[in-house]
Image (cartoon, rainbow, N blue to C red):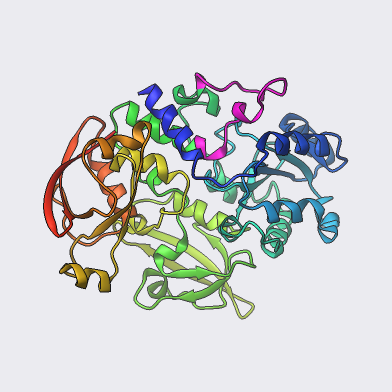
């Protein structure tokens, strides 16, 4: 199982677009910032010490230098002159690898290539920042949301320690290992420090590998992967609320008939608190949902026309399962676990009509079949590109690839096979879907 999980982590790297000279990019980043007057380069201990002595909040930016995603955002944060005065109110640390992260303190969306956490010098987390807008558009240099998050964090800092109790929910939860390189799936290949005298890129633990390691940890113990690791850091869109990408947590739209609409959210509302936690970013909203129960109620406080309004947001059963995880790099290892290395998408209604398939039945077309390692298990089991899944075990109803991944990882363990029915050239075929 150790070698399998390592292969899963390595295979996922193939699908992350990277700069051509990865080694040069990492070494160039170090040359540029190791003596920078603002940024403490890969030195968390000094950062926390300075935060204590200067009484400034600590801003820790995690950046995957070889990855192109968020390159524009990273450049803007480092170079935009108008951010300078704001950044100078923080002790700033730049981290380019996750090898030695304290996993109790550093719990965030591991699938992003640019993330930020803001701390008090004593280690208390004020909030998190991460943008899927920039992740999807590497050239986007917009810093409005980042700027507003930093400003909101300064307000939280000004209220500390009187507000420490309301920050309790922002702190990390229990973890099986203190640092990523203590996970068995990573310990055989990675050390706590980068190998600057050798191949530095190959010695780097990428943030998404941390999420991969958590999932492999549960599978190696013969346990289902918990929901929060199948659908990590969910967007509030699963509850019918769309947030503006240039604000802290401002409601842009509310879909009728959804939990967000039933709770009374309105466009223009600014979410000030969620589950009693002060919000400094959209990532903070996702953090609350990441730690939320399978169903229940969350309290919310919104600013509407300069007045505060309290709302109650109901989490219906299986709300988290509606998350779309198809674009996450961390989903590739899960595709190996659940599908033997295939990628599939739900057929639209027009395509269903051509194949004679009902709108409410399963119809997941295979667009990719892996060729190597654990991602070749489906190929070895006889599955092919363009197969259309219409049954997987007892599952026959229409669902997304993301929903099927959740169903299988929650209900099946490595070594099992699941009877499946696919359409191939108009003919039904029975095949066994391997679980890893």
Tell me if residue 191 is in the magenta stretch.
yes
* Nearest to the observer: residue 228 or residue 53: 228
> In which quadrant is the C terminus drawn?
top left
Q: Where is residue 60 shown, x and y percent of the image?
A: 70, 42
Q: Residue at x 72, y 33 (%)?
A: 44
Q: Main secondary structure of the magenta part?
A: loop
Residue 101 coordinates in the image, percent (x, y): 61, 31
Relative to 134, say whether 348 is above or below. below
In this view, 203 is above or below 288: above
- In the current view of this chain or complex, which residue is farthest to the bottom? 305
The x, y position of residue 100, in whole percent, is: 61, 27
Total numbered circles: 0
Q: x, y (%) of residue 95?
A: 69, 37
Task: Write down the quadrant of residue 226 in the picture.
Answer: top left
Q: What residue range appears in magenta?
A: 187-209
> In the depicted view, which residue is nearer to us: 61 or 357?
357
Q: Quadrant of residue 362?
A: bottom left
């Amino acid at each position: 199982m150790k070698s399998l999980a390592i292969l899963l982590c390595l295979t996922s790297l193939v699908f992350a677009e990277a700069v051509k000279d990865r080694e040069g990019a990492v070494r160039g980043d170090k040359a540029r910032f190791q003596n920078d007057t603002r940024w403490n380069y890969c030195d968390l201990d000094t950062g926390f010490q300075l935060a204590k002595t200067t009484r400034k909040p600590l801003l820790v930016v995690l950046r995957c230098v070889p990855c192109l995603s968020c390159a524009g955002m990273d450049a803007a944060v480092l170079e935009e002159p108008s951010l300078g005065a704001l950044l100078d109110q923080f002790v700033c640390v730049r981290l380019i690898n996750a090898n030695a992260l304290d996993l109790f303190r550093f719990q965030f969306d591991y699938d992003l290539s640019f993330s930020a956490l803001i701390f008090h010098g004593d280690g208390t987390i004020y909030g998190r920042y991460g943008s899927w807008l920039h992740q999807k558009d590497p050239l986007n240099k917009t810093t409005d949301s980042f700027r507003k998050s930093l400003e909101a964090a300064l307000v939280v800092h000004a209220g500390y320690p009187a507000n420490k109790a309301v920050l309790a929910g922002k702190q990390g939860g229990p973890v099986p290992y203190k640092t990523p390189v203590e996970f068995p799936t990573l310990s055989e290949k990675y050390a706590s420090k980068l190998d600057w005298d050798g191949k530095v890129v190959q010695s780097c633990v990428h943030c998404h590998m941390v999420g991969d390691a958590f999932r492999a940890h549960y599978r190696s113990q013969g346990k289902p992967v918990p929901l929060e690791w199948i659908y990590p850091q969910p967007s509030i869109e699963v509850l019918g609320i769309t947030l503006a990408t240039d604000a802290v947590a401002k409601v842009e739209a509310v879909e009728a008939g959804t939990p967000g609409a039933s709770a009374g959210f309105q466009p223009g509302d600014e979410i000030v608190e969620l589950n009693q936690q002060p919000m400094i970013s959209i990532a903070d909203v996702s953090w609350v949902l990441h730690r939320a129960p399978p169903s229940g109620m969350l309290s919310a406080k919104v600013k509407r026309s300069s007045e505060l309004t309290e709302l109650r947001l109901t989490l219906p059963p299986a709300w988290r399962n509606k998350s779309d995880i198809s674009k996450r790099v961390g989903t590739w290892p899960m595709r190996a676990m659940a599908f033997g290395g295939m990628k599939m998408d739900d057929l639209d209604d027009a395509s269903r009509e051509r194949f004679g398939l009902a709108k409410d039945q399963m119809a997941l077309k295979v667009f990719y079949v892996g060729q190597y390692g654990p991602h070749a298990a489906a190929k070895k089991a006889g599955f092919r590109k363009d197969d259309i899944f219409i049954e997987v075990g007892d599952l026959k109803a229409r669902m997304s690839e993301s929903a099927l991944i959740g169903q299988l990882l929650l209900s099946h363990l490595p070594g099992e096979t699941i009877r499946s029915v696919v359409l191939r050239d108009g003919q039904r075929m029975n095949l066994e879907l391997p679980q890893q």
